[in-house]
Amino acid sequence: MITEEKHRDGRRGILLCSLLGLLWNTVAAQTRYSIPEEMEKGSFVGNIAKDLGLELSELSEHGARIVSRGKKQHFALNVRSGSLVIADRIDREELCAKSVQCLMNFNVLVEDRLKIYSVEVEIIDINDNAPRFREEELELKISETTALGTQFILESAYDADVGVNSLQRYELSHNNHFSLLVQNKDDRIKYPELVLERALDREEQPTLHMVLLARDGGEPVLSGTVRIRVTVLDANDNAPVFTQSAYTVNVPENVSQGTVLLTVKATDADEGSNSQVKYFLVKIPGEISQIFQLNSLTGELSTLQNLDYEDAQFHEMDVEAQDGLGFWGRAKIYVTVLDVNDNAPEVTITSITNSVPENAPPGTVIALFYVHDRDSGENGEVLCSIPGDLPFKLEKKVDNYYALVTDWTLDREQVPEYNITVRAEDFGSPALSTDTHIFLQVADINDNPPTFSQSAYSAYIQENNPRGASIYSLTAHDLDSEQNALVTYSIIESDLPLEAPPLTSIVSINSETGVLYALCSFDYEQFREFQLRVIARDSGDPPLSSNVSLTLFILDQNDNTPEILYPIFPTDGSTGVELAPRSAEPGYLVTKVVAVDADSGQNAWLSYRLLKATEPGLFSVGLHSGEIRTFRTFQDKDALKQNLIVAVTDNGEPPLSATVTVTVAVAAADSIPEILSDLSSQSSPETQDDSLLTFYLVIAVAVVSCLFFTFIVLLLVLKVRKWWMLQVVQATGNHVGGVASSQFLGVDGVRAFLQTYSHEVSLTTDSRKSQLIFPQPNYTDTLISQQSCEKKIPLLTSEHVVINKDQSTSFQYEFTDLQDGT
């Protein structure tokens, strides 16, 4: 025998040699190492970083770790040194048993870069297990009458190592009666047998002692021994007899392992060793040998594993009692397994539908299933139920079949799908149950019309919008699904103003999206709002619909230039002229420019300003009133004819404007005919000679009667023209409150815009000059201060009253857009 100390020294030598012979290689992207078993924890396996071509920084910075499939981690990764080390004791026999080759596979994962490497480590067996026998001593009882050459099978030794380190040979200690025969079977196990070489004699030697030695082929060689004691028996003539021919026992299936079920008993009439009996189970069918075991000495029958009533309800076996020489007796053992509730009910679905329409009537079958419990009695009786308040119920059919049916009408819009739990519970104690989940979708039907979020809609659109542009979007929601929720839109009616064009030429709607498009460019001045009704219809069968009203409000844009109503360009070829007395004080109202704008709001707020004048600084224009007033008193150097260009601008964005030219004649009261004559001839006369004044005065007195008659006729003409002007203004726009009207004084085709004056004439015979008093002008839409009244100017001479000329003064007005700079 080899001592334990030598055994440890041999293991250290093997370990040292294995460490020196450590190998690694890489095959097909797999790194492989070979190490001996039983290495100490922390032992170096290999430089994994170098072998995998990784930098040390990659191991620590990118989260390198070992990923293995086993529950126990045998290797560890040292990220600082890049080494693979032993993390726990490795016992090759524990991992691979008797396998010729023992391989351990794991992976190295570089987590941040998602790289994984395969590593394989071969565990090399070391001779760390000596051959051993199950028993320390083997006892053989051999009759002294046994024939020579008889073979007696001995117990084989077991060596957990493999290869050369495993069991290699047996050796039998020296004796005079037996030899050793070793046989190799197909499973490569060596079976030792004793061969009787010399007859036994109980009286000469009743007991023989030998030692059987088993050796392996390791370095150093390890061995195990078993003592063999041969007892020479006397002749035996009585067989063992059982106390009962049959043994029966009832046992529940949930008894624990190792429970003693019964004890058999046999007796032998012989004496001494011939009366010693051992018990054996014989002719065990199937797997009974793995379920029960019989104590060969006591006859106790016990369980090796749990019983299962569902696998076998009854076990039958033979028991044999043998004495030392092989005489035997037999009996029967019957084991009845009693059922306990250890099986939950089993549910098998035979038919199922995954979808049911929401209008399905109550009683519609959803699923058909079969329920079975492997237990018996009450343990096998099953009750099925549906937990929770669901619109379903179970109907019992034949042979433990159940039908899951609807209990009341479903509504997909409230609950579109159900996860139904069917619970099958037995009546055992404690009760066992099984839950089966059935997923059901409720199929939609067209039972919901499209709905709008509002009962009415309003939209605001700028006029002059581009044709084809989208102006509003309507959306209707349908609680149904798929085709039943596919909504189309259309316009069914409208409420348009009388002056508006047909609806089909104004707007259209996209039938799929509900987007409203303008087919024309809206004009705020044409109509300002209109109403239409939109219908939303789904695509179900039959289709459902709903409608909603939409009011479109047209918003104004500054697209109209101010229109000048006064002064008006004459239509008879004459020229309009405003007259202003030379004696007028600053602030004297000469005339008023009246204009309107077809737009609304701030787009129609008008402002007036003087663009150009013959004498800058002589006249001013009211910013918001349009009144043209004198800014200073007239001087002798001022021209008798003043041309003023007035611009009228609205407050839109961008602003639009128009211009008008106003001609103002400046003269004393007695020089009005001369001014009119000069205007008609388009020439500016030179300063009149004082000698002509007397001549003109005589003419004036001569025609005073004609003047009076002319004045009466002119007054009638002005009344008629005023009425005609009022009709024109009213036709232009009702929002214009009034237009400044003037009376006209005509002199041979020259038409001057004169205010109506209330005047007083004083004529003397001895004076070359008389006085004409000019009171306040009578404007229909302008308030003049009392200071402008009772202004006196020289009396008109006769030559200033009527002058017949073929020529006419020019009066012109023009509209100019300031944006164009004209």
Image (cartoon, rainbow, N blue to C red):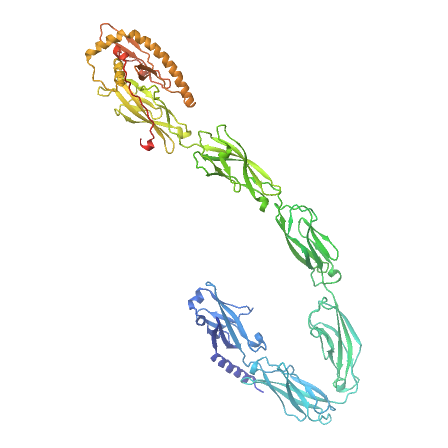
**Residue 137 showing in the rendered view:** yes
Query: Where the C terminus falls, by quadrant?
Result: top left
Identity of the residue drawn at 20% across and 16% down: 687
Q: Is residue 338 left or right of residue 811?
A: right
Q: Which of the pair 202/642 is nearer the observer?
A: 642
Q: Quadrant of residue 712?
A: top left
Identify which residue is drawn at 71% across, 58% down: 371
Give x and y (percent) for residue 773: 29, 11
* Quarter of the rendering containing residue 731: top left
Q: Is residue 654 above or below residue 107?
A: above
Which residue is at the front of the view, 719 or 796?
Answer: 719
Residue 239: percent from left, percent from top: 78, 84
Residue lying furthest front? 806
Question: Taking the image as drawn, is residue 37 in sight?
Answer: no
Image spot of residue 364 (x, y percent): 69, 49
Which residue is nearer to you in this view: 200 or 706?
Answer: 706
